[in-house]
């Protein structure tokens, strides 16, 4: 198949990892893949399976970048592309223009829960399918009544399991136990609750270190500054580390005894799945995505959103019971392999493309 992917992301996050994994896997399966990205986008370095001439850099400041959309439409016509797949909301209109009157079918991926704008009712009438990365996102899309329900398909994000090999974490060797969370620094990710829970856990034992990995995407760095202030106020400078951006998440997870997802809202929870794949015991707030991923008391623990006492209690209980941590971690690894592999995600996406092309031909 001949496919164009559009992504105007300025930085790398869960959605961009998803795009890169999908594009590289499709290219390795012999499909002719093109990718349209912003000039200087960090996404380019992730597209290792594409020849440089198949990566098109175009200015895409917003949904009304008509000039760039027309250039993409020309590419679609000249290369006789069959699928145009847009990955961010501001790229949906570009994808609609690029696929319009060319014979290509428009596919969208939706990663978030908040509603689309009313303009999308006009620009996306020709959308063949919308891929929701979770059932929660699919439900949000159905509630908006922009797309016919039969065009909304749930395909969970998948990860490359080879990058997340479980590591043994022996107790009793004098090392500090490590409790961590991974995600960009923002109030919605709940890192403040994580820090407050760390302060409560520390009252009972001092052999624990807490790691917060992730970059601050706010313009002035106010999110990190706020967390640093809280760490100082709670006198946690020796216990809590703000690690910043981590390139090799699998390597970091291999050092964790416990992974915490304190998010106040999570449409899917890629970091949760990565921790499960790495064989790390997971405690998560009962966000939309976490409830879909974790089977309570089988592949992890769920606690109420924003409940610092419950987060701290789960951390203390599990750090005191290595057998229970190991049981939950082993089950989590099995679940991740069965439900969230990269191969499974690519297989389902590839099948969807074929279905859309066949339907269009008839």
Image (spheres, rainbow, N blue to C red):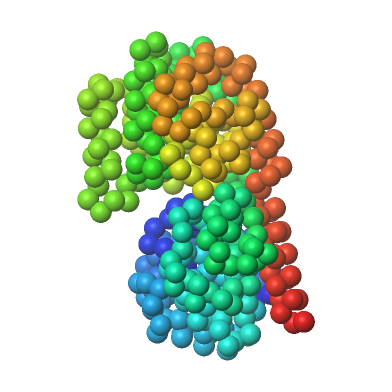
**Which residue is depicted at the point 29% across and 23% down?**
236
**69 to 26, vertically: above or below:** below
Of residues 129 and 258, the one nearer the viewer is 129
Residue 183 seen in the current view: yes
Give residue 68's quadrant in the image: bottom left
Give residue 51's quadrant in the image: bottom right
> How far across and down, in percent of the image, does residue 217 sit?
32, 51
**211 to 127, vertically: above or below:** above
Give residue 64's quadrant in the image: bottom left
**Which residue is depicted at the point 37% across and 30% down?**
193
> How far across and down, in percent of the image, does residue 346 sit?
67, 58
Position of the C terminus, as image quadrant, is bottom right
> How far across and down, in percent of the image, does residue 260 sit?
48, 31
Q: Is residue 362 left or right of residue 156?
A: right
Of residues 100 and 278, the one nearer the viewer is 100
Of residues 52 and 43, the one nearer the viewer is 43
Residue 55 seen in the current view: no
Position of the N terminus, as image quadrant, is bottom right
Of residues 35 and 338, the one nearer the viewer is 338
> How far across and down, in percent of the image, does residue 197 sit?
38, 24
Q: Is residue 156 left or right of residue 219?
A: right
**Which residue is depicted at the point 45% across and 25% down?**
311
């Amino acid at each position: 198949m001949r496919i164009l992917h559009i992504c105007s992301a300025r930085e790398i996050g869960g959605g961009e990892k998803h795009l890169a994994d999908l594009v590289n896997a499709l290219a390795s399966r012999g499909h002719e893949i093109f990718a349209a990205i912003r000039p200087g986008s960090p996404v380019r370095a992730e597209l290792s399976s594409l020849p440089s001439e198949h990566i098109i850099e175009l200015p895409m400041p917003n949904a009304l970048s008509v000039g760039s959309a027309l250039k993409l439409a020309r590419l679609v016509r000249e290369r006789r592309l069959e699928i145009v797949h847009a990955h961010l909301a501001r790229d949906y209109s570009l994808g609609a223009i690029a696929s319009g009157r060319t014979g290509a079918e428009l596919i969208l991926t939706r990663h978030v829960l908040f509603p689309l704008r009313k303009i999308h009712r006009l620009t996306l009438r020709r959308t063949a399918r919308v891929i929701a990365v979770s059932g929660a996102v699919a439900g949000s899309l159905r509630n908006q009544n922009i797309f016919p329900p039969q065009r909304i398909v749930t395909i969970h994000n998948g990860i490359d399991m080879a990058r997340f090999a479980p590591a043994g974490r022996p107790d009793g060797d004098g090392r500090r136990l490590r409790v961590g969370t991974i995600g960009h620094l923002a109030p919605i990710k709940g890192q403040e609750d994580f820090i407050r829970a760390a302060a409560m856990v520390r009252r009972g034992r001092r052999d624990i270190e807490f790691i917060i990995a992730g970059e601050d995407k706010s313009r002035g760095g106010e999110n990190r500054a706020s967390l640093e202030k809280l760490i100082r106020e709670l006198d946690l400078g020796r216990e809590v580390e703000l690690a910043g951006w981590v390139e090799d998440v699998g390597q970091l997870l291999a050092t964790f005894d416990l992974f915490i997802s304190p998010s106040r809202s999570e449409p899917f929870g890629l970091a949760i799945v990565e921790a499960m794949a790495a064989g790390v015991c997971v405690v998560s707030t009962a966000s939309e995505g976490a409830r879909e991923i974790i089977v309570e008391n089988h592949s992890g623990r769920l606690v109420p959103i924003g409940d610092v006492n419950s987060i701290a209690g789960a951390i203390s209980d599990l750090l005191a019971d290595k057998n229970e941590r190991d049981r939950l971690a082993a089950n989590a690894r099995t679940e991740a392999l069965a439900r969230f592999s990269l191969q499974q995600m690519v297989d389902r996406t590839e099948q969807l493309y074929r279905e859309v092309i066949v339907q269009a031909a008839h």
